[in-house]
Amino acid sequence: MNLGKRIGMLIGALTLGVLVSANAVAQPATRFVLPGGALTSTKILPGQSATFEMRVDSPSNGLVGAVLFIQQTAPATSGFLTVTGRDFTASIFNDTSSGQPDAVVFALPSALLSPANGDNLSRSTIGLVPAAMGSNLYVQSITLTSDPATPLGTYTIQPTSPSSTISDLTTDFAITPASFDIIIGATLSVTKSGTGAGTVTSDIGLINCGATCSDIYPGSTVTLTAAPNAGSTFIGWTGGGCSGTGTCVVTVSAATTVNAQFDLLPQTLTVTLAGTGSGTVTSAPAGINCPGTCASAFAANSTVTLTAVAAGGSSFAGWSGAGCSGVGTCVVTMSAAQAVTATFNLPSFNLTVTKSGTGGGTVTSAPAGINCGATCVAPFVSGSTVTLTAVANGGSSFIGWSGGGCSGTGTCVVTMSAATTVNAQFDLGPQTLTVTLAGTGAGTVSSAPVGIACPGTCAFAFPANSTVTLTAVANAGSAFTGWSGAGCAGTGTCVVTMSAAQAVTATFDLPPVTTITGMPTNPSSVANPQFTFTSSIAGSTFQCQVDGGAVFACSSPLTISVGNGPHTFKVQAIGPGGNLDPVGATYAWTAAGIVIASVIPTLNEWMLMLLALMLGGAGMLMVRRKA
């Protein structure tokens, strides 16, 4: 059916009027919905159709009924749109408590209201709608079909209140959104070409190409903007009446295609000359002529061939970089900026360093190459001058050079006209032996061979790798308690190998002083008195003596047994080096009143005594009988 300015056909949708006490009416809501969500517009081409839904929602239960118009408000063009729809019939309920049949019957597709005469051909039965109905009580599917000759533009469709004479219904709608746009237009498409990349965007519509390269426009004027990606450049537009590299302004009055060309930027090729020799590098196509012009820009993805030619007396050693190697030509594809190195060398000879002697050291060269140490052979170009420097290790001395025309102990300067060998001699120097005296006592240390006589001469230089024997002698009243350092220990002689500087310590200690710290009272009635004692030197041991008897090893505390009478206890400390306290500590006391407890024989002891008496008696009897 054709539409004029106003699409005057009723879509049989129910207006919701919720009747409560005193005929109070709750406001319903009507909304337009596209499949997939609540939208405000859709786009079609002339001759195509757009389908959407018009829904009537009620926020509560109540009585429902009435009719609804839709109309076209813009543009002011008629005769190109046709509307069709379908009905939706609600469920039938059995509750008749309201006095009305519990049914809601919606208008059939043929029950339309003519805007010309207001003739309502529909029938609506008003009844209670229970809570089980929920919202969206009525859904009307509407299809608008455009004629192929429909002018481009935006056609706005909106509901409007009907001319209803039903007195107990309301047509006060809340509409969300207030209207729905049918955009009838032509397609604008963007294509891209060239070796590069970029994006095209539109000032209106959805074009972002990239991802979205076309959209429908209702005769609009669209401005397209091109942006090249990094490494690319925008060459220009074709199609749609556009050219150049600015924006493209297109009036979309018919299907239009615009192309944007992006090309890769020119890429720079850089050549570096390396090595001890010299030569030239040129390119085809022209651009590189190095030395001179060693960097040039070439078309993206083009192929450049580099050729190297060595100068007189030099040789071309080869390419590196951009996938090139060997000594032929270097072919570079300019897919990106590229860098190539061409190496030219002069003839070279090996310089060899050897080392001799009993010592050690290093030899280095200027220019770098020799570090002997590890690297004792290195090539140097023909005619170059190499300076060798020798440094002796600790404990060694540099004796001098031989070979390569060098001698003495200074630097060795070699002119590389041929392979050359140079020797550096390092010998060990004298090594110093140092003796330190330590401890609380005193003594002397001497060496064989002669050199150390300490105190006095406590440090002396002996030939490298020689053997030195040290002997320690304690002064009167002191004791030699041992060596430390250079692998020596104990109290015998100390034998040192002079493979490097050595240090030895000799310790002499005075005799320890012994002190009794705990003893019995005098007089004492204790049969088992306890003594405690200490030494002035840590780590000492002790020997003890009671009443002038045998000397025995002892430790503190010590318990002894005594009877009544005078007694003497003596203890002497022995230092860690075996140095005995010559005096020691002595304590004398008298024991009195010590009670010796009588011993009561056990039963076994009584039996043994009785047996002995019996045997004794028997023996006497036998003697008498013999007599």
Image (cartoon, rainbow, N blue to C red):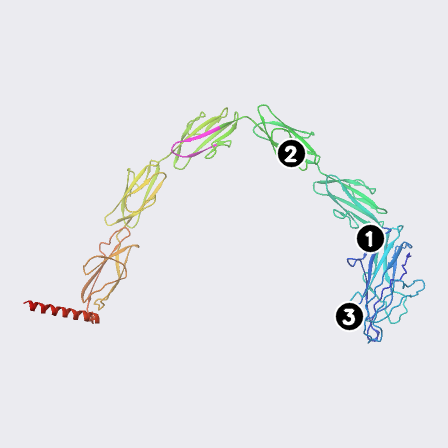
Mark 1 highlights which residue?
43
Q: CA distance from mark 1 to mark 2?
A: 54 Å
Say if the magenta span includes residue 217.
Answer: no
Q: Quadrant of the N terminus?
A: bottom right
Discs 3, 2 touching: Cβ within 8 Å: no
Q: Main secondary structure of the magenta part?
A: strand
Q: Residue at x 59, y 23 (%)?
A: 312
Mark 2 highlights which residue?
270
Q: Residue at x 24, y 50 (%)?
A: 477
Select label 1 or label 2 by which is in front: 1
Circle 2: residue type:
Thr
Between 101 and 447, the one lying in front of the other is 101
Circle 3: residue type:
Ala
Q: Which mark is residue 131?
A: 3
Residue 355 shown left or right of residue 205 in the figure: left
Mark 1 surroundings: few (<14), some (14-19) or many (≥20) residues within 10 A = some
Question: Where in the figure is residue 133, as x and y percent of width and height?
Answer: 78, 68
Mark 2 surroundings: few (<14), some (14-19) or many (≥20) residues within 10 A = some
Q: CA distance from mark 3 to mark 2?
A: 81 Å
How many numbered marks are there?
3
Say if the magenta span includes residue 353.
Answer: yes
Relative to 146, does residue 390 appear above or below in the rendering?
above
Residue 174 picture quarter:
bottom right
